[in-house]
Amino acid sequence: MKLEDTLEDVILQMTKFPVGGAIVVNDRNEFLGIVVEGDIRRTLLKSQDGSKSGLKTPVKDFYNQNPITVKHDCLAIDALMLMENSSKSITMLPVLDASNEKIVYGFIRLQELIKEGFVLN
């Protein structure tokens, strides 16, 4: 997603690719942040009081600019520990290049880690 895309664009993209979030990049495809389902709900709630334009709200107004991330060489169990031990409810982590944090590879999702048998003892 780009900063000028709208909430409606994000919803359509997340419906087409249902992973629970979307990555936000600049014009050079460098990582800027993420949008998750909670961001969408909060933005829609704000639009009820007339302060925002609802589905036409630009991504730049509601995306998470400082998400918790992991590097591409992070072990799956370490990503799981990060998600489980966070004070926030984290179900997905953007995966960034270890030497260049502007390069994003995708997401690692809690659901997939559990499905593959990863558990914390």
Image (cartoon, rainbow, N blue to C red):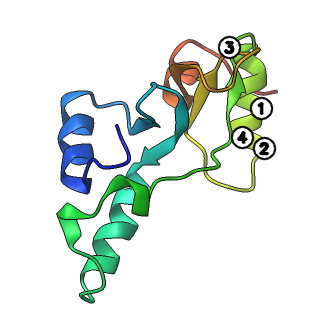
Marks 1 and 3: CB-CB under 8 Å? no
Marks 1 and 4: CB-CB under 8 Å? yes
Where does the image place residue 66, in percent across and percent down from the top left? 65, 49
Marks 2 and 3: CB-CB under 8 Å? no
Q: Residue, x 20% and y 45% (percent of image)?
A: 9
Type of the residue with mark 1: Met
Determine the CA span between mark 1 and mark 3: 16 Å
Per the image, the residue denoted by label 4 is 84
Name the element at disc 3: loop
Per the image, the residue denoted by label 2 is 85
Where does the image place residue 116, in percent across and percent down from the top left? 55, 12
Above or below residue 28? Residue 85 is below
Per the image, the residue denoted by label 3 is 72
Per the image, the residue denoted by label 1 is 81
Name the element at disc 2: helix
Marks 4 and 2: CB-CB under 8 Å? yes
Of tags 2 and 3, the one toward the viewer is 3
Residue 29 falls left or right of residue 18: right
Above or below residue 94? Residue 66 is below
Classed neighbour count for the residue bearing mark 4: other residues with Cα under 10 Å, few (<14), some (14–19), many (≥20) = some
Determine the CA span between mark 2 and mark 3: 20 Å
Which numbered dot is residue 20? none
Type of the residue with mark 3: His
Name the element at disc 1: helix
Marks 3 and 4: CB-CB under 8 Å? no
Residue 25 falls left or right of residue 101: left
Where does the image place residue 39, in percent across and percent down from the top left? 42, 58
